[in-house]
Structures are given as structure tokens and as C-alpha cells.
Amino acid sequence: MYPIVLRLGPLTIYSYGLMMAIAFLTAGYLTGNELSRKGYDGELASSMVLWAAVGGLVGARILAIVDDWSGFVGDPLHSIFSGSGFVWYGGLIGGLIAVSWTIRRHGLPWLTTVDCIAPGLVLAHGIGRIGCQLAGDGDWGTETTLPWGMAYPNAIVGWPYPPGVRVHPAPLYELIAYTLIFGVLWSIRKRTYPDGTIFWLYLVMAPIARFLIEFVRVNPPVFLGLSQSQLISVGLVMIGSWKLLSARTLTVRPATSLSAQKR
């Protein structure tokens, strides 16, 4: 693993931070292009990315603290200011709240805007997992004898296994899954759908991927044999599925009524 990419005197470039920066820039670029394509100011994407970063980091840290409350009570300063231990779903919720505030502040339609954000968001998530893989921040999986199993001897989070033990490279699994989801969302973005469809699809597909990958990760079960991330994934899939079905019903009903009137 390569937690540090480069040292130049007092300047240290960390792989996790570098990939996070690339992820935010990628999300901003793709979101700006989509906003411009739909007739809105693409420059607003940079403001959204900034607030998404702030809200996301705060949300990710808060959920990490809740997830490890005993560690927070034992050493609050380390829990708050540690460079590791962020929880993705906390970041998603915090980032969404911050971006929603930005959307409202600029008078943009929420559903149309989050449709513009969704493809870049899922790709950025995949890029961020490259940083997790390089840094070894504890996102690895359980032990495996598969040929692509890996060890993380230089991880920034303590390696919990004996030397030589190989585990599932869970961050790479997520990278592959989110890249494929990006391909789906990006390929259908120009089709005619009710506003919000791309975002609701994201809320279905990305959490399903995370739910499945959690089975080979080391996160402990908290309820019914499922981890915290799996429970949140189930909730998001339910929301996304419900909204997709609702949008489809709303678009079909007028056509049906009009047909009945013509008879």
C-alpha cells in the first residue's frame, strides 16, 4: 500500500487526500457539464462541490463517531480530528443536505439538479475508493484464498491480521461496481424521463452494490445479521424504488385519462 505519494521537504502528499481531490474535481466537472446541457449555469457546480465537501466531511465524521462512541468518549479529540474513520453514508447525507441548501439558494429545481449530480457522484465515490485502497484505511474485507486477495501491511489503520494473511480488496470491488453504475447512468442521462429518475436510480443501484459488498467486509452486524451500512442501504433502496414507481405512476395516469376522454 502507498499511504504517502510524495514528500517534498515539509510538504507531504497523501494518497487518500489526492484521490479525494480528484474525486471532487471529477464530480464538479461532470455536474457542470450536465447543468450546462440542461440550460443552467454550469459554474454553480464548483459551489455545489465545495459545500458537498464540507457537509460530506462533517456528516462522515459524525456517523463515524456514532459508530465508535466508546472510542469518542475515550479520546474525543482524536475521534474528531483523525485523518481516518470516515463513514460514507454519513458523508452522503451531510453532503446532500449542504448541496440542497446550495440548490435552493440559487433557485434551481431540486430534482433536475440532483439528476445532474448523480452520475458524477457515483464515479467520484469509486475514485475515492482508490484512495481507500492505497491508504489502507480499514475498508478491507475478510480473509480469502482467492488469487486476487491482498494484504495491507502499510495501512494507516492498524492491520488486524497476522503477516501474510490475504483479504478481499473490498475498495476495488466498490470501484468496479460504482464505475459500472456510472456507465449506466451516464448512458441514459439524455433520454426522456421524469425529473429525478437518474437520482432515484442511483439510490437503488449504488446501495445494492454496497449491500452485497458488505458481506465480504469486516464491519460487524448490528441488527438481524446486517451491518449498519447494509441497513442504511436497504432504506435508500426502498426510497429510490418508491420514488421511481411514484414517478412512473404520475406520468402514466394523464395519458390513461386522456385516452378515456377520447372514447
Image: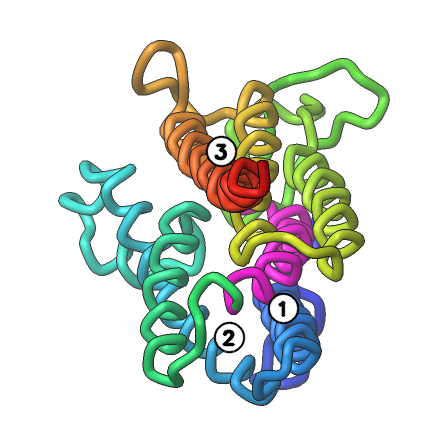
Asked if residue 102 is positioned above or below residue 167 in the image, the reply reads: below
What residue does disc 3 label? 241
Name the amino acid type tagged 3.
Ser
Tell me the element at label 3. Answer: helix
Q: Is residue 149 magenta?
A: no
Whether the residues at callouts 1 and 2 have beta carbons within 8 Å, the answer is yes
Label placed on residue 162: none
- Nearer mark to the viewer, of 2 and 3: 3
Relative to 145, 237 lies left or right: left
Amino acid of disc 2: Val
Marks 2/3: CA distance?
A: 26 Å
Give the residue pinned by disc 2.
49
Residue drawn at point x = 27 percent, y = 59 percent = 80
Count of numbered marks: 3
Q: Position of residue 214 (x, y in %)?
A: 54, 26
Residue displayed at 57% across by 88% down: 41
> In this picture, which residue range is highlighted in magenta?
113-139
- Asked if residue 58 can be seen in this view, the reply is yes
Residue at left 53%, top 36%? Answer: 260
Image position, residue 202 (x, y; %): 58, 46
Q: Nearer the viewer, residue 138 or 100?
A: 100
